[in-house]
Image (cartoon, grey):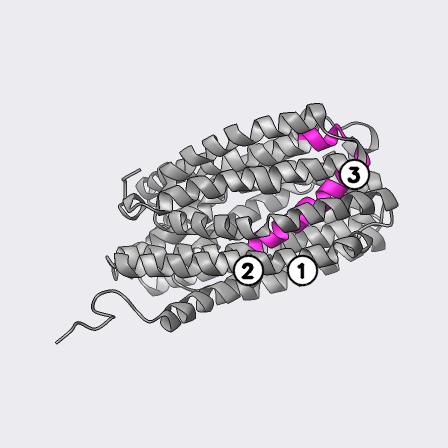
Amino acid sequence: MPESREATGVVPASRNAREILRLAVPAFGALIAEPLFLLADSAIVGHLGVAQLAGVGLASAVLHTAVGLMVFLAYSTTPAVARAIGEGKLAKALAAGRDGVWLAIVLGLALAAAGFVGAELLVDLMGASGEVRQFAVDYLRWSMPGLMAMLLIFAGTGVLRGLQDTRTPLVVASAGFTLNIVLNLILVYGLNWSVTGSAVGTSVAQWAMALVYLVIVRRNARNHGVSLRPDWRGVRSMTRVGSWLMLRTLSLRIAILATVLVVTAQGSVNLAAHQLAMTIFTFLAFALDALAIAAQALIGKELGAANPAKVRELTRTMIRWGAGFGVATGALLAAAAPWAGGLFTSDAGVQSALTLALWVLAAGQPVAGFVFVLDGVLIGAGDAKYLAIAGVVNLAVYLPLLLAVRVWGADGAAGLAWLWAAFSLGYMCARAVTLGLRARTDKWMVPGSS
């Protein structure tokens, strides 16, 4: 009698689709919380003036570097918890999540203190001057209280994703986004705190979200007899795994920071337009990353259950979906580009530059969909070392493209368009090649094979 499809590890495509959607749809809402924070901040601050918007853009680039480097708190926690769930070891899964939270506390305290004290130095290193510099310092300094909260959110979200729960992060993110808008409107316009009010409002909303995750992690640990005290060996293990993911993320952040350095030299109009374009790119990236989050949780769980056939089938399905979603978002963005600028600023120069940048960004969305999905698959498999090495290679490809834009690029809006061509086409295609080549092999499915 022939074996069933389930017995061989191959399941119907409809079942795979249901599993992916069960995690990806709620993850979409949760993932876009942070870019929605930034979109709201940009819309509110943008009507204060070009200098304020440019200052927030510069400070956001620095802030995102710190936050982005710490995203390994989610990316290392999710597969660790998911693998333990696949093995049927719930206590082990919750212990891994607890250690991730403790690591977030330690790193958050250190980074927030350093950022508050060194805000002026960090902004000066980005080449800002005049009013733009002061607004950037104000926004960066008063965003620091929320930095520790974001790290706790990463760790807490990673625990729940690993437990195959993306609905709770959706509820928390929705409430946090609503609170953020209300606080920003009150502080920026009601109390006339300018960009400082935007930073403070966002920090308060982030702390409200972080406290919810702390309560959830504490309750789950106690309900299953897991001590709340950290296992420092577990924390060190999480740090070792995260170090490769940090290098991967560092290469991404260097690419983004280098892009900001080039656009800063193009003037405040292009810098303001770039801030808006990058905020929209981040929004779309997190939307596409919903599939990557589903990949992290499902791939980690199925590898823990020793089911490579299903891992392959899930990967193929998610790649198709990612590329298709990229086509859809690219088409929508291209259609909306001529009118998008008016939502954020009344400055005609910024609107014109933004339109060109968004058309280029739209063209790169299918590649982005492929990249984000495969990135999630390899993270879920724990293939952190390869991702780190590939990230360095991709950066080596991108930096000469940026240099060419800096030296030979056009002026005005055309200069920003060439910059975005280098980023959303050149850099993202380099990432697609390195990730695609790895996915064609079986090495990424074997722990420690990198």
Observer-nearest of 319 and 93: 319
Q: CA distance from mark 2 to mark 3?
A: 28 Å
Residue range highlighted in magenta: 261-286
Observer-nearest of 112 and 61: 61
- Under tag 3, what secondary structure? helix
Percent x, y for residue 181? Answer: 72, 58
> Seen from this angle, which residue lies furthest left?
1
Q: CA distance from mark 1 to mark 2?
A: 11 Å
> Relative to 270, is 116 on the left or the right?
left
- Residue shown at the point (52%, 30%) measured from the top left: 397
Q: Quadrant of the N terminus?
A: bottom left
Is 283 in the magenta?
yes
Q: Quadrant of the C terminus?
A: top left
How many marks on residues? 3
Q: CA distance from mark 1 to mark 3?
A: 21 Å
- Under tag 2, what secondary structure? helix
Q: Give the main secondary structure of the magenta stretch.
A: helix
Residue contact at pointers 2 and 3, CB within 8 angstroms: no
Q: Which residue is mark 2?
A: 325
Residue contact at pointers 1 and 2, CB within 8 angstroms: no
| Whether residue 28 can be seen here | yes
Q: Earlier in the sequence, mark 1 or mark 3?
A: 1
Percent x, y for residue 347? Answer: 87, 46
Q: Which residue is mark 3?
A: 413
- The vertical placement of 345 against 173, above or below, is above
Q: Residues within 10 Å of mark 3 (few under 14, many from 20)?
A: many
Q: Residues within 10 Å of mark 1 (few under 14, many from 20)?
A: few
Q: Within the image, what quadrant is residue 30 found in?
A: bottom right
Q: Within the image, what quadrant is residue 337 found in?
A: bottom right
Observer-nearest of 331 and 56: 331
Percent x, y for residue 218? Answer: 42, 58
Q: Which residue is mark 1?
A: 332
